[in-house]
Amino acid sequence: MRKDILAVDDDNDILQSIKDIFEHQGHEVFTANNAIDCIDKLKKGFKGILLIDIIMPIVDGWDTIREIVDRGLEKNIDIIVVTAVGTPYHEKMKGLEPYVYDYISKPFNVNELVESIRKLT
């Protein structure tokens, strides 16, 4: 069964690339440009795989993940960080490690991202 995907990134080209890659593989792909849209989609019942960037304006990815956990919205999602930040070991990540399934650096290798998602479906 193909899981739905919610891609969260402030770069529309990245969102379109992810949409193109995974819709072609049979996933339904939703997008959000920021933390507010992401949280809203989760509150409305999104279940599946969350691909989230770290470097975003106003609210970054770590704060978004923390908000997701604090609100109890992490129960029906698998979180994969897809970001240009080279290392996941950031002060803000402390305590969030159990909620992050994978960490993929940009520019991402399409095969690596596809394989990470395949393991969750």
Image (cartoon, grey):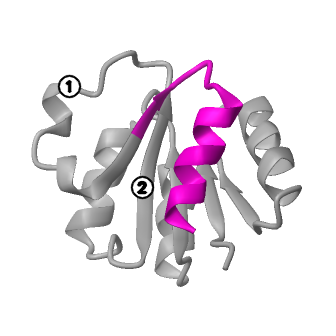
Alpha carbons under labels 2 and 1: distance apart:
16 Å
Nearer the observer, 76 or 70: 76
The answer to whether marks 2 and 1 mark residues whose Cβ atoms lie closer than 8 Å is: no
Residue 9 to residue 39: above or below: above
Q: Is residue 121 left or right of residue 66?
A: right
The correct choice, above or below, for 89 with respect to 7 in the image is above
- Residue at figure coordinates x 59%, y 34% from the top left: 112
Foreground of the two, 6 or 70: 6
Q: How many marks?
A: 2
Q: Locate residue 88, reporting x and y percent.
A: 28, 28
Whether residue 102 appears in magenta in the rendering, the answer is: no
Looking at the image, which is closer to me, 102 or 44?
Answer: 102
Q: Residues within 10 Å of mark 2 (few under 14, many from 20)?
A: many
Describe the element under mark 1 as helix, strand or loop: loop
**Relative side of 2 to 36, left or right:** right
Residue 104, percent from left and from top: 47, 31
Q: Is residue 83 left or right of residue 74?
A: right
Name which residue lies at 72% across and 33% down: 14
Image vertical order of residue 35 relative to residue 53, above or below: below
Report the quarter where the C terminus lies: bottom right
What amino acid type should be assigned to the residue bearing mark 1? Tyr
Q: Which residues are magenta?
A: 103-121
| Secondary structure of the residue carrying numbered label 2 | strand
Nearest to the observer: residue 100 or residue 73: 100
Amino acid type of the residue that numbered disc 2 sits on in the rendered structure: Ile
Residue annotated with mark 2? 79
Is the residue 108 above or below the residue 118 in the image? above
> How far from the left and from the top, in percent, is residue 107?
62, 18
Q: Residue at x 11, y 40 (%)?
A: 94
